[in-house]
Amino acid sequence: MKTALLISYFFPPIQNPESVMSLHLAKYLSRLGWKIIILCVDKPGRGGMDFSLDSEIPSNAVVYRTSGFENFITRILFYFWILPDSKIGWYFSGLKKARQIIQEHRVDIIISRSTPIASHLIALRLKRTSQLPWIACFSDPWVLNPYTAYPCALFRKPQEYLEKTVLFNAERIIVTNEQTKQLFLENYPLGEKIRVISNSYDPEVIPRQGSAPKNKNLVITHTGNFYGKRSPEPFFKALAAVILKQEFRNTISVQLFGSIGPFQNLISQYHLNETVHIRNAVSRREALRHLGDSDILLLIDAVHKGESPFLPSKLMDYIGIGKPILAITPKGASMDVMKITKTGVAVLPDDREGIQKAIMQYVTSWQQGQLQGEPDWSEIQKYSAPILAQRFSEYMQEVIDQSGSFSTTHAKI
């Protein structure tokens, strides 16, 4: 049995999309014969805990949690791009524990996941001292993130140096979609070392399609927080226009699980108080249950010019459930998945008429009892965690084989 050290700042019971993706990887790699050792932070600093996820952690996995810190100062320094991320305080305790792990266990390969970038920086240091093979996984772009605006080259250059160092030292770079892959390839000569493995859904915890009874109103559900450029306003504008029509009045109920942040006032502004309901954040299992009991699953991505390289993990849950999806998203990764899986309607954020039309079509189909849609399950299953873990396992073995045999007793730590 080969051993992998998975360095992921977020891991259950921390409630975070990145922790769920790390859990999927650990859970199904364990079933493929790998011993997984997880290094993560003990407290997230901000965000909640979800202890319902604990039961999914593999019994043969070993989890080490170390202290980290994120405070006002680190967030300010990150905001002005003086630090690579606001959670860099985890680097020192994480690196110390990682060195102990390599000394105590026969580790065959290192896997690091971001966000945050601190995970890759720990792995980079381990790579240089131990010479263990290393796979770096990016859920989002780093310096090349299109929403990153550096004030000048003086701030960007140090980050580019770190990014280039990570990319060139890792044996494999894993990204979640073709758009991110092309973004990296346009800027770095990575060749075949960069591969695509999407975010995933877990078929063992996803509610089955069609299990919910018909609701009194058409229930549209969104899970997750709104912040920055991820705004519900395009949806609110279209929804307000729809419910003004007599035939659609009092037919729709929208529930938003999570924080709506600075957009709370939009509900009153568009006279949606009787239609849109804000719910508190809930555990992952409860969120999945609410999604399974809904009629339409709502995805809202941030506005973006050009091809978006972002693939939210919630979309994987949505397509796994199989309920119709209304995706308000720019062209790019999310829209591609929607088209391939045939799981609903994807509309550009600035297409108010298109969003309005999609809502009305869904309401009409619901009223006629014809809302099920025809998702392509053969394509949907390609995003399941077991299948993607199998591909990841093959990459791991490929990297180990190419690196040659290695004994950690000779590692310089």
Image (cartoon, rainbow, N blue to C red):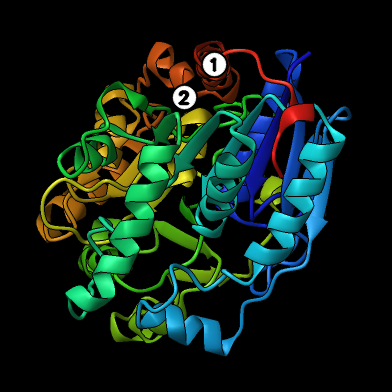
Residue 110: which quarter of the image?
A: top right
Camera-side residue: 57 or 301?
57
The residue tagged 2 is 383
**Residue contact at pointers 2 and 1, CB within 8 angstroms:** yes
- The CA distance from mark 2 to mark 1 is 7 Å
Q: Amino acid at mark 1?
A: Ile
Give the quadrant of the N terminus: top right
Q: Write the residue at 75% across / 13% down.
A: 33
The residue tagged 1 is 387
The x, y position of residue 207, in whole percent, is 64, 32
Q: Write the residue at 45% across / 29% down.
A: 171
The x, y position of residue 301, in whole percent, is 31, 56
Whether residue 342 is visible here, answered yes or no, is: yes
Left or right of 314: which side holds 168?
left
Work out whether 147 lies above or below 103. Answer: below
Q: Write the residue at 71% across / 58% down.
A: 94
Q: Write the residue at 52% across / 38% down.
A: 317
Element assignment for label 1: helix
Camera-side residue: 42 or 193?
193
Work out whether 74 lies above or below 390. Answer: below
Residue 336: which quarter of the image?
A: top left
Give the quadrant of the C terminus: top right
